[in-house]
Amino acid sequence: MKTLLLALTATTALSAPLLAKDLEKDELTFGFIKLTDMAPLAVAYEQGYFLDEGLFVTLEAQANWKVLLDGVIDGQLDGAHMLAGQPLAATIGYGTEAHIVTPFSMDLNGNGITVSTAVWDEMKPNIPTDADGLPQHPISAAALAPVVETYRAEGKPFNMGMVFPVSTHNYELRYWLAAGGLEPGYYSPDNVTGQIGADVLLSVTPPPQMPATLEAGTIYGYCVGEPWNQAAVFKGIGVPVITDYELWKNNPEKVFGLTAEFAEENPNTTKAVVKALIRAAMWLDENDNANRMEAVEMLSKPEYVGADAEVIANSMTGTFEYEKGDVREVPDFNVFFRYNATYPFYSDAVWYLTQMRRWGQIAEAKPDSWYDEVAKSVYKPGIYLEAARALVDEGLAREADFPWDSDGYKEATPAADIIDGIPYDGRTPNAYLESLPIGLKGEQTVVGNEIQG
């Protein structure tokens, strides 16, 4: 026993300086929603990357996105897996006001739009088929438009679900609908339903409840992250019609968010967290996704996503099932590290802000400089690159894997990579808004039920 105690004492003495790392806070609680794109948090915990940085982390599933955001703001959570729109909306005072920052983007792609099997049957005659007789992808919302018109003629509102007013899912669903000629509705300071002038009425449903809400007939379709599109396929109640990879190739998704105050008061801790998350993202994508099945088993645990491993694997391992039995290769459905997925680009932030303006959540026109300033107040690539540099210096990452010389803006997304054929350049947000056929432009505002200006 004495020998064992001496050995333990020696081990503790050797590891203590390594674990301390001048951390301002080493016991942390992070929140997440039960979606597969929370994977970097689970992997950083399960693989010991947090511990390697001297961090003792607790991961806690949250009931919904509002509860999660409130938990970060009031300090019950030190940080969280967040919708990219949440830090931006909070910082500009749309909804709950607080300065939230992100030094780490969690993933690219990962969402889908699903309709009920009944709506799918009504859409199919409007969808061309390929040489094998299968529906030709990507499927435009133009195929849904006659269905919506039929429901309107019968006096039935066409309801669809998304997960939160400032979620990627809200903006992606709106983008898809508008690209197919359907009005998804507007917000105004006096009416925050987002349903002003809408052909399709969008409302909030928490991600894990999407399939049940669809099955109950409360909504006819939804946009959500995995595994809740594949869950509808497995239950035989819904058909995913498009993935966000098909909507906008390698689009930004979730972020890791924390208060600006926490990041300022705990710079070493924040850098350590980002280091652990970068390592987790690298592990998820390394060797052509060789670790994905291990990640699937991890995520299927009830404390993480809690869905059947088979359902999670359907999208997480490089395939995606649309109509039952129609399984297609989508190797980049989930991207965690490739294509600089973890770098918090200002241009990603600007896109979210343009969509807030497009649909009236930002009520009045803003100059291009405003978009740039807000992006830089929320997205923190400097912290990210400090963490990346430390990993390279420690031999844990490769120099070539990080965009050291970036000004924070990606090259413009080409027209061919977006479903409506309209390119996106984050450096010119107002010109981008002008290029979109549906949505607010210039000095336009929503007054009552009308667009004015």
Image: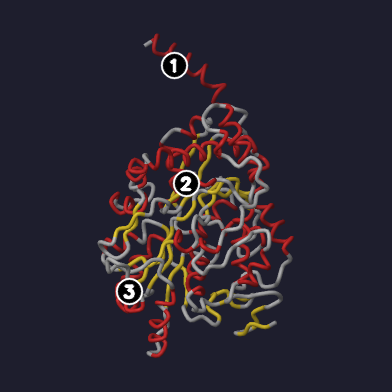
The amino acid at mark 1 is: Leu
The residue identified by callout 3 is 120
Model colouring: secondary structure
Quadrant housing residue 434: bottom right
Which quadrant of the figure contains the N terminus? top left
Q: CA distance from mark 1 to mark 3?
A: 63 Å
| Coordinates of residue 288 in the picture (x, y in percent) | 40, 41
Q: CA distance from mark 2 to mark 3?
A: 31 Å
- Tell me, for residue 8, which label it has, or none: 1
- The residue depicted at 40 percent of the width and 69 percent of the height is 139
| Coordinates of residue 253 in the picture (x, y in percent) | 51, 55
**Picture layout, residue 298 above or below residue 438:** above
The amino acid at mark 3 is: Trp
**Front: mark 1 or 3:** 3
- The residue depicted at 59 percent of the width and 52 percent of the height is 74
**Picture layout, residue 301 above or below residue 133:** above
